[in-house]
Amino acid sequence: MPPTASWKRLKEFVIDAPEPELSGGPLARLRGAWRRNILLRLGFGIFISVAASTAIYTTYVMQTLKSEAEQNVRERAERLAAVLSQALARPLFDINSAAVSSVVDASGATPEVLVLRVLAPNGAELASYVSPLREPVAAIKVHRDISFTDARRSYPVGSIDLAFSRQQIDQDLRRQIYNTVAANLLLALGIVLSIFVVGRRAARPFADIQTGLEKLTRGETDIKLSGIGREDQVGRLSGAVLRFRDTLTRLRDAEQELRELNSDLELRIAARTGELTSSMQQLGDSQAKLQTILDTALDAVVRMDLAGRIVGWNAQAERIFGWSRDEALGLALDKTIIPARYRYDHRRGMQRYMAGGGAAPVLDARIEVVALRRNGEEFPIELAITQVKSEGQDSFEFCAFIRDISERREREQKLVNANVAAEAANIAKSEFLANMSHEIRTPMSAVIGMAYLALRTEMSPKQHDYISKIHRAALSLLGIINDILDFSKIEAGRLEVEAIPFALEDVLAHVSSVTAQRAADKHLRYLVSTAPEVPRYLVGDPLRLGQVLVNLANNAVKFTAEGELELRCEASRVDTQEGKATLRFTVRDSGIGMTQQQKAKLFHAFSQANGSTTRHYGGTGLGLSISQQLVRLMGGRIEVESEPDQGSSFHFELQFALSDVAAVAVQAAVHQGPVGDLTLLASPRRAARILLAEDSPDNQDVTVELLELQGIVVDVVANGREALDRLQAAEPGAYDLVLMDLGMPVMNGHEATRLLRQDSRFSELPVIALTSHALAGVEARCMEEGMQDYITKPVDPQRLFSVLSRWLGVSMKAIPPLPPRADAGLVDPQLALAELRGLLADFSGDSVDYFGSVQASLATLLPPVTLTRLASHMMHYEFEAAGKLLAAVVQELEKP
């Protein structure tokens, strides 16, 4: 805007503004002053606000004071009535009129008492007092019943009516209200006067600003403003006026510069027009290049306008959909490449998006949908849609990148089919292993059980040797079966480790007892050591830890022809504050050792160092693989150090939580103790009766024989239905326990147990599961169905006796095998005792056989209890414990 125009508009605003009308009567003058004087309006508004707030506050205070005063008066009247009731109770009960009148007259000493009436129980007035005041006074009335109470009961003797004056309190209330109103009015007047005084001083800078603006309209720039330098709104307004003056001055100078620049701008526009013409030509060339790039793209590129018509179509789109570019351009997209069943959804989605109904989920994302070719064939595509802004300000297009994924879908379907087939094969393998476990364990149970029973009968030495070898071979075969099952559980991810309290020394003692005989048979030195700082009581999985150590120790015995092997436990870290310990277990041998190539495939399933190793040393190649997987499940990893002909050292570290002896004792009480904890001598007990549900005749015979060895009466049924019928036909207390096989015809053990638990008469009857399915989840299922314990086949007699002892509440003796019949006379018992002690001291593998041959001779020298304990130690290869027992016997025999 030219400076002259600015001056003209400022003059019209400041000078030519219409003046307010001042003529007329007083009301008109007052209205004019009201419009002109902002201070008048401000003062009046504050006065009205203060007056209104005063009225509201006064009303609130009056009501509050009134309520408090009335409450105080009523409380005083109630207290006076209570005092009078207590004073009148005895006189009224004694019908003492003089005393009643004395109390009534005495109440007149209280000036607030206006009326006091004493009434009999029937309502008759006995005495009264009326205040001599002549003027009517507001009062509070109180009525109270009077009763007299002696040691036994209460007697109603009358009542009083009391009128209590509130005159004095009303006067105090009015005085407080007047004072409050007067104070607030004085405060309001003071505030209004202060505003007028301050306002007159604040109006002066505004007068200076008005004078300065009038000078500016006349073209004068020498203006003085008293508000300059202040930090409030007046100071900022004065500064704005000065800046406005400076701006007008600069506009005057800029007008001349603008004329000079105008001519230069015309020259620049001419030059820019030429540049734009050249740019348009380059843009046309770029569009041609862009179309060439799109035509060489491997994906179809299709553009659509807001009306749903195709406006872009590259060469790949022609090949995928079968429409040429000229044919496709201008066609509706939904009728061209979208199948008919999706067109309605496409149109609805476009309408919602254009109406602003929310973000479209298909934009800026890759999705897989079905498209339509020109020949009507449907095929899968991968689609990505973006919004592209076009030349118009608010216009845009949609650009779709389309990829034919028919071949990829075929490959994916093949992978899905292969995965389904793999899962089916895995399920079939699991079912096969479960079935094979059942089918193998069932006859194995009969073999091991019959061998166990046969060893407890009288046989010739050759027969005893045959049966012993059968028993050991069957147990070895059972170990192989267990390894295969453990491997299948690990492969399927269904093997879990426990976290229970246990004593480490028990685990190491078990490992030593299981593996010492094999080392003794090969005359190897066997060392088991535990560092002093190793905690005794831990929380972990003792069964799996023992299984790993047994596998490693047996492996060391297998590949060591002479020398020694060592099982060592050390503490890598013990943190008592956190309650954790990291232990290092090492199994070292002086055997054949391994090369680097052999160590690389050491932990692979079904493999050993080389093919000749398997043939020479035996084994399935599963032991180390299973051990590695178990250690990984427990949070560690087995490492091996070995050199050919220098032996091997296997070690791993595991972290355990610390425990104590009390927790271990509780755990031992919940679960069965080790076999060594069984009472070896039969104790007096009641006769027990057990129902055995078993479909295999051989297993029936084995189980019945084992139970009859303990003096238990056994009834046998062949399936779950017969078991239910037998139990229901007998009395609820007829049987002390049920041994229930899970896999039986007609009705299996699971169904039979569920039906049994529905009958409340048998809710306390213990049911022990017998099964050949040693797979994960079976034990948990049995517990959920109401069974109390779980025994796998082949049945371990000591495990069976331990479970029965716990649930029947009686002790059972361990029954050692009988020695073979001696072909000749008995050996001298003293010589036999000395020879046996020597063999035990050398940990000789012949100790067990020699004991069997001289057991009959030792029976003439040793007490029955000692002989039974010795037989138990020898049966479990506890050579050290047997040697200590014989040393104690010799000392006892040598006493005079």
Image: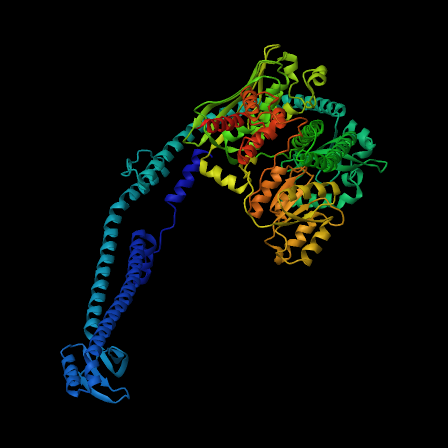
Taking the view exactly as shown, the residue that stands out farthest to the top is 645
**423 vs 643: above or below:** below
Mark yes or no: residue 165 visible: no
| Spot occupied by residue 102 in the image (x, y as percentages of width and height) | 14, 83
Left or right of residue 884: residue 694: right
- Quadrant of the rendered image containing residue 777: top right
Of 851 and 46, the residue lying toward us: 851
Quadrant (top left/top right/bottom left/bottom right) for the C terminus: top left
Question: How does the figure colour the protein chain or chains?
Answer: rainbow
| Spot occupied by residue 407 in the image (x, y as percentages of width and height) | 79, 29
Left or right of residue 743: residue 840: left
Of 745 and 654, the residue lying toward us: 745
Mark yes or no: residue 556 visible: yes
Left or right of residue 820: residue 63: left
| Spot occupied by residue 855 in the image (x, y as percentages of width and height) | 60, 29
| Spot occupied by residue 698 in the image (x, y as percentages of width and height) | 74, 40
At x 70%, y 55%, the residue is 726
Of 795 and 182, the residue lying toward us: 795
**79 vs 410: above or below:** below
- Quadrant of the rendered image containing residue 221: top left
Taking the view exactly as shown, the residue that stands out farthest to the right is 375
Of 120 and 375, the residue lying toward us: 120
Total marks shown come to 0
